[in-house]
Image (cartoon, rainbow, N blue to C red):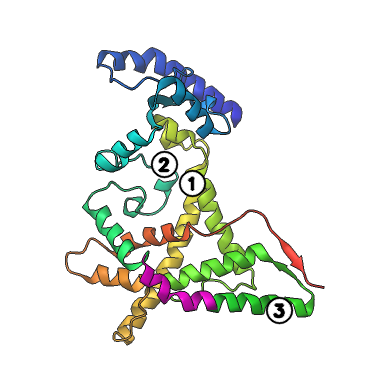
Amino acid sequence: MEIFLYTLLALISFVWFFILNPRLNRSGTKKFPPGPTGLPVVGYLLQLGPKPHIKLAELSKRYGPLMSLKFGSVNTIVASSPEFAKQILQKHDQVFSGRPLPDAIQAQPNPEATIAWVPGDHQWKNRRRICNTQLFTTQRLELLQHLRVEKARAVRALIRKHCGSSDPVDLGRLEFAMSLNLISNSIFSVDLVDPDSDSAQEFKDLVWRIMEDASKPNVSDYFPMIRRFDLQGVKRHISSSYVRLHEIFDELIDQRLKARELDPMTPKGDFLDVLLDQCQEKGSEFSRVTIKPMMVKKLEVLPVHKFELKVAFL
């Protein structure tokens, strides 16, 4: 696989320099801030090293607080001063709010419905408003305080149970299960996993696979012209996890819709109820299809540590 990848990069290098590059030169060049030249084809991609933030700080001392680098065939502008950051993030935030969508993110169903990657248009503002007013608020945290107390007591009882039988406790799996159930109760008002069963580990592996693949360096993001080939298989590997998560959400949505039909006067008051209410409003931009990526984003804050810590009570 590595030999094939290197051969393909060499072929891309040949095509770029002897076929594509002259055409680009004839069509006119864009003006970019100063920056290092980098290597042919890959640009500065291989020179960032294991600590890119330190390398970029060193480069800014030489080329200034606003510099340009080329990662593969993608031109990137780097701002490294508070003044330029303020110009980009505050004064001209609408102009710079767009961002390229990583190939791994596009593997999920309906990636255009996500919050983190969609353009900053009125649809994005509407979704963000719902999150800010219905989920990430002090009142919402206060309403969920009893859940946090309840889950903490459940964990303590589980540890006592293992202490009595001298069985080891997998604290990593226990922490993940408690965090997952806290989030799932805030969204669906149900526990998704049993902390004392293997289901917690299965769901943990599912979420971890998504986070790991989405953060993995992908050659398709630096050479969009070969994105369709998915050379590293990242998109193929992550898509099954996204599909499975959406299947779980579909089951929970179906259960909630049936419950609302049987007892419409007793809402759960969780995030799913808020989204379903939005879906039922006339002219709403929300639908069953667009609310599921928002739930995926909520689950991505779970602590899915790769280590396992088991404590035995003797």
From which residue to which does the magenta span run? 137-149
* Residue 81 visible at all: yes
Residue 96, above or below 184: above
Spot the residue most to the right: 314
Residue found at x 77% / y 73%: 167
Spot the residue most to the front: 83
Classify mark 3: residues with Cα within 10 Å, few (<14), some (14-19) or many (20+).
Answer: few
Judge left or right: residue 189 versus residue 198: left
The residue at which mark 2 appears reads as 102
Q: Give SS at disc 3.
A: helix
Judge left or right: residue 25 versus residue 214: left
Q: Earlier in the sequence, mark 2 or mark 3?
A: 2
Q: Disc count in the image?
A: 3
Tag 1: residue type? Ala
Classify mark 2: residues with Cα within 10 Å, few (<14), some (14-19) or many (20+).
Answer: some
Magenta stretch holds residue 130:
no
- Between the C-alphas of marks 1 and 3, the distance is 38 Å
Q: Give SS at disc 2.
A: loop
Residue found at x 45% / y 35%: 220
Percent coordinates x, y for residue 48 in the rendering: 53, 28
The residue at which mark 1 appears reads as 214
Q: Nearer the viewer, residue 11 or 285?
A: 285
Q: Nearer the viewer, residue 191 or 59?
A: 59
Q: Earlier in the sequence, mark 1 or mark 3?
A: 3
Percent coordinates x, y for residue 223 in the rendering: 42, 30
Give the numbered dot on residue 160. Answer: 3
Q: Earlier in the sequence, mark 2 or mark 1?
A: 2
- Between the C-alphas of marks 2 and 3, the distance is 45 Å
Tag 3: residue type? Arg
Residue 197, above or below 261: above
Spot the residue most to the left: 283
Is the Cβ of the residue at disc 2 closer than 8 Å to that at disc 1? yes
